[in-house]
Image: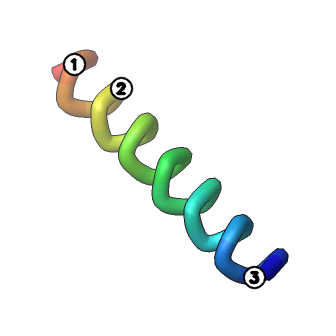
Amino acid sequence: GGAEREQGLLQILTEMDGFKVSTAQ
């Protein structure tokens, strides 16, 4: 469903943000 899709996108965005932060540091 749409909720599952949103959850997946949120997880991807969170992982990307964490990757950027760890890379910046």
The amino acid marked with disc number 1 is Thr
- For label 1, count other residues whose C-alpha is less than 10 Å away and answer few (under 14), some (14-19) or many (20+): few
Residue 17 in picture, x, y percent from top left: 43, 39
Q: Earlier in the sequence, mark 2 or mark 3?
A: 3
Most foreground residue, 22 or 8: 8
**Quadrant of res 8:** bottom right
Which residue position holds label 3?
3
The amino acid marked with disc number 3 is Ala
Q: CA distance from mark 1 to mark 2?
A: 5 Å
Residue 21 in picture, x, y percent from top left: 30, 32
Which residue position holds label 1?
23
The amino acid marked with disc number 2 is Lys
- Regarding mark 1 in the picture, which secondary structure is present there? helix
Picture residue at 75% right of the left edge, 82% below the top: 3
Picture residue at 61% right of the left edge, 72% below the top: 7
C-beta proximity under 8 Å, tags 2 and 3 = no
The answer to whether residue 25 is above or below residue 4 is: above
Most foreground residue, 4 or 24: 4
* Farthest residue, direction top: 24
The answer to whether residue 19 is above or below residue 4 is: above
Left/right placement of residue 25 relative to residue 12 reads left
Picture residue at 19% right of the left edge, 30% below the top: 22
C-beta proximity under 8 Å, tags 1 and 2 = yes
Q: CA distance from mark 2 to mark 3?
A: 26 Å
* Colour pattern of the rendering: rainbow
Which residue position holds label 2?
20
Picture residue at 35% right of the left edge, 26% below the top: 20
- Regarding mark 3 in the picture, which secondary structure is present there? helix
